[in-house]
Image: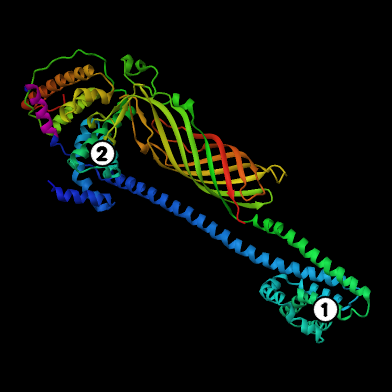
Amino acid sequence: MMRQMDQDQLVKDCLKQKREAQRALYELFAPSMLGVCFRYTKSLSDAEEVLQEGFIKVFTRLHQFKGDGELGGWIRKIMVNSALNFLKTNQKYRYDLSFEETHLHLVSTENPEVNLQTKELAELIRQLPTGFQTIFNLHAVEGYKHAEIASILGITEGTCRSQYARARVLLIEWIEKFSLKKQNGHYGAK
Amino acid sequence: MEQNSFEKNVQHKLDELKIPPSDSVWTNVEKRIGKKGKDRKLIFILFFIILFLLSGGYWLMNSSKNNTQQKHQLTEVKNDSKATNNDNSSFKKTEPATHDSVKMRDSANVSEEKIKTESIKIQSKAEVPNEKLPGSKTGMPERKQAILLSKNENEKVENKNKLSVEADSKPTADNEIIIGKENIAKTDSVLDKKESAEDSLEKKIQTIAKKEPEKTIKKKKDHWNFGITFSGGTSMISKSQLRNSAFFVSDPAAYNGGIPSYYYSPSEIRNSTGFIAGIFAEKNISAKKKISIGISYKYFSFLNKVGNRIDSLYSLPQSYSLNYAYSSVNLKTYLNNFHFLEVPVSIKFQLNNNSNLPIFWNAGINISQLISTNALQFNSGAGLYYSDNSFFNKTQFGLSSGFSATLFAKGKRPFNLEPYFYYSATRVANKGLYDKKHFSFIGLRTEILFRKK
């Protein structure tokens, strides 16, 4: 991992519009950030589009980074917001990102071991319906609270909890099935 | 705790997810950030061009003023000379030599330009009339000078002018008067005529002196004059298109196969105040046409209803780096401000012949650069207003028009008053809440011109 001092210098150089520094910053964070974007979209090309828009925002708003937190965390938040914006403005995702208004939700107590590789788990999450996928990513991976997600997506907190619970149940079911198939030597997403 | 173990497990796994992006991503990022840098450079270049034009105009105006002063001096000398010649003509009856001096004056008019170059000489000679007197008294009257001139016809024109100007100058007139005095004993009638000629000379000089300022004003009309302008009125945006915004979904259930979808519609954007303030330079390009160029600060504003401000970093659907957004519940009025730097270029056509109250039709083009804005965008899915200035077209090309009446048109501070209309040909934005909209402005414009003396 890059030392804090090096990172500060990198940020300073980027602010001076030094292209080498900007390239270095991009290369440092791009692979992990594409992993973030990948989880929110349905295709790699869409994920790359989000990554591109995200990095443009990073470079144009780098002066707003106060340096009081981790640069990686700051960039990650930009990527998440870029991904959400992409979902809401892109015709392909826009109508899938809708939620039934309900306060009833299943309570799952299952906590299975996730014996999948990272890429396999990410692929399973991407198989979820867009609404489920988004809420699951925001709550389980990014750590957003239900109230915050509800505010972001313009839904009630109850709906958010319900959607998350359903997403969780579905994902656990798929993980178990996938793990079983893997054990039996059959591979597949579902 | 148990429930969290699954999430933690997933989180831990996904944190390790790294996918190397294709090369095209960086290429596109590099292009876009380079373009943004170029845009900033363009603004600076534009600013310096304007500064250069304004300072150039100012320099031009000053140098023109100096020329006017020089011409003014020359005019004084010429008028003196003309007055002298007129006086000479009055002596025609008694002194034949004056006829020759008129001829010499005519030869002097052959080349006015040459005379101009000699204006300083003429002035100094005019100031010391007595230097010439002895010459005349000692047998060098105008007749001899005329003979000398005719003998040297083949000489350069410059020399001719020198001679003729010398002959034309005021001292020559004085010489005539003195010559007349020498002959006073001969006839009383000659004396009477001489006295009346002196009176008429003084009167003519006074008349010319009175007429002179008018000539100077006429010349100054061709110079750049500077002024200040202020317009106040209403900034507007095309409403009808706003209601058909792509973000507005009137029947949410129509989407998603009948399953109710939750889309929010933005509140109505209302017109609000706007003003333009700046400086300009104006110049006559013909008797009834003027050209004007300036630099102005332009402020447009619009109102809409928003909800409470959300400050949480985690609650924002858009660029959280701004750290806030507004919910769509219509609780309070939000003022969307747009600040522009504008370069207006216009032509004024005078519609009437009244020089005391001229009426002009103004038509112009305006190039504006958006300096800053706090205008909100709307996210229909989240029902949130947020700020994203990347949606806006930063450079706007607009057309303006108006009819102005000029008060105190002949004074030093002419005052223009006009109804003013502006329409931006460039779209406000190509996406978002202001997608395919155009700015317009209607108001009252005032201009005060500061004429140089």
Q: Nearer the viewer, residue B164 or B400?
A: B164
User: From the viewer's perspective, is residue B290 above or below residue A157?
Assistant: below
User: From the viewer's perspective, is residue B362 above or below residue B186?
Assistant: above
Residue at the spot x=7%, y=26% of the render?
B5
**Which amino acid, by three-letter code, is at mark 1?**
Ile
Q: Secondary structure at mark 1?
A: helix
Magenta highlight on residue B319: no
Q: Which residues are magenta?
A: B2-14
Position of B150 with respect to A50 (left or right) is right
- Which of the labelled discs sits on residue B178, or is there none? 1
Please give the chain letter of the residue carrying mark 2.
A
Magenta highlight on residue B7: yes
Where residue B116 appears, x then y in whole percent?
68, 71
- Which of the labelled discs sits on residue A51, or is there none? 2
Figure quadrant of the C terminus of chain B: bottom right
Residue at the spot x=22%, y=48% of the render?
A11
Can residue B438 be seen here? no
Where residue A85 appears, x then y in whole percent?
30, 31
Q: Residues within 10 Å of mark 2 (few under 14, many from 20)?
A: many
